[in-house]
Amino acid sequence: MPISMTPAARDRLVIALGRNPGRSRSHNRRVVLDLLRSHGQLGRKELADMTQLTTQAVANIIDELMAENLLVDLGRRRSGRGQPPIQFAVNPDGAITIGIEVSVSHLVATVLDLGGNLRHESRLDIDDTRPEALLPMIARRVETLRAKFPVMLMGVGVVMPGPFEIEGLSGVGPTTLPGWAGIDAAGRLSELVGMPVLVENDANAAAVGETLFGAGQALSNFCLIYFGGGIGLGIIADNLPMRGAFGNAGEIGHVVVQPGGRACLCGQSGCLERYASLHALREHLEGHGHSADFATIEALHQEGDPLLTGWIAEAAAHLSTMIGFLENILDPQTVILGGMLPDSVIDALIAGLRLGPSVANRQDRSEPRVTRGQTGQLTAALGAAALPFFNAMTPRLDLSEGPGRSSEPAAQALEKGTVA
């Protein structure tokens, strides 16, 4: 299934200028690659003018990238008098990235090619989420995909539910992964797969996925409320993911929205996750004798089942409060709802919102206050594969800095030409 960025999304990724001799060769390569990716095709002179590199420096970079099969020669473009310039473009078949999304019940794997097209997606149900079971499973999945796509592997991104390393929250309850506190997931996986692995929480990765492939493509500031096992928030601010000091920005699942409400395993009462999450919906349905898999939820909604209708009304009420908070604190262009719920249920949640006044309640709005995401259940998995892709190719889009999440290894992998 081809999933690629629109011109609007490409234009949003601001290009950093190149650096001439004495500065970063890796940076220059990424600048050239990013310009070619965003513009489709360019000649040496155009690239030199855009990057402020010398024509010879650009020629050297193009020769290197051609030798590594990352670019293709499109021949000469007819343009008025004189010798037409040779055009170069990114070679979609030249490299891939692998994304792995880990949740409490399943593992999703995706492969993106160098053009940002989805080449593979698969889902595997899991029942053991401990590190000693999941780490080797992820490594085996990566090995299988490398064998299936024997080209340069630019990097591996893995996303999982947060929060990370927070006393009283990490590993608490059925929407998080037990036993992961103190585990250097990025380091352990990098050793197992033999190359750098970037690790991110699922809501942040989902926001990246929606930025590049979905409803956030033309936006520079938005919030994504993500329905995974629990409920999380990805924030894009000035085109960049907001991660916070320790990678836990947007942890809204344990914000109290109903003081004195339902007890939560985090020790509080009335957390948003207890009312407006996929786990809360499953708990509600299974408590009344219904199964709660995706297909059943979709069918119940089509039938107008009162149990599901009641949950939607209650969840929408609490989401309305949270969205008002987000609008007043972050002033986003819009709030996107997306993740592992059927589109029809997300649409019903949006229809059930009762939004009060906030800074978002303006007459000159160009976007709705709330909208549904466009990447469906794949949004976090697409974001996982995009993490190393854009860390390696985009000079500015820094998606994974912080403890254990350096952006430099992916760039080094691209420069070194890591091949499956």
Image (cartoon, helix red, strand yellow):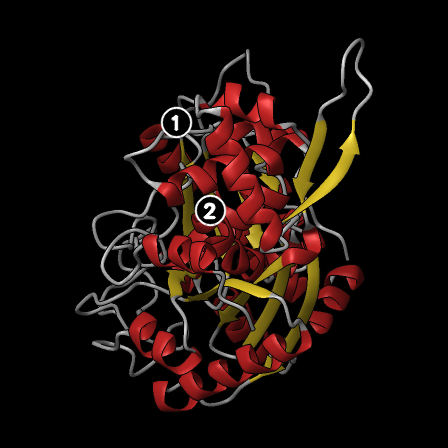
Residue 221: x and y in percent read 45, 31
Kind of residue at badge 2:
Leu
How far across and down, in percent of the image, does residue 51 sit? 47, 25
Coordinates of residue 279 in the picture (x, y in percent): 49, 70
Q: In terms of secondary structure, where does tag 2 sit?
A: helix
Q: CA distance from mark 1 to mark 2?
A: 16 Å
* Residue 332 image offset from top left, x and y in percent: 44, 30
Amino acid at dot 1: Asp
Using the image as rendered, state which of residue 42 and residue 303 is in the foreground: 42
Against 18, residue 112 (above or below) is: below
Labels 1 and 2 touching (C-beta < 8 A): no
In the drawing, does residue 419 fall left or right of residue 269? right
Q: Residue at position x 30%, y 63% from top? A: 163
Location of the C terminus by quadrant is bottom right
Are there few (<14), some (14-19), or many (20+) residues within 10 Å of tag 2?
many
What is the quadrant of residue 96 in the picture?
Answer: bottom right
Label 1 crowd bin: few (<14), some (14–19), many (20+), radius 10 Å: some
Toward the left, the furthest residue is 167
Residue 319, disc: 2
Question: What is the secondary structure assignment of the residue under circle 1?
Answer: loop
Q: Which residue is mark 1?
A: 331
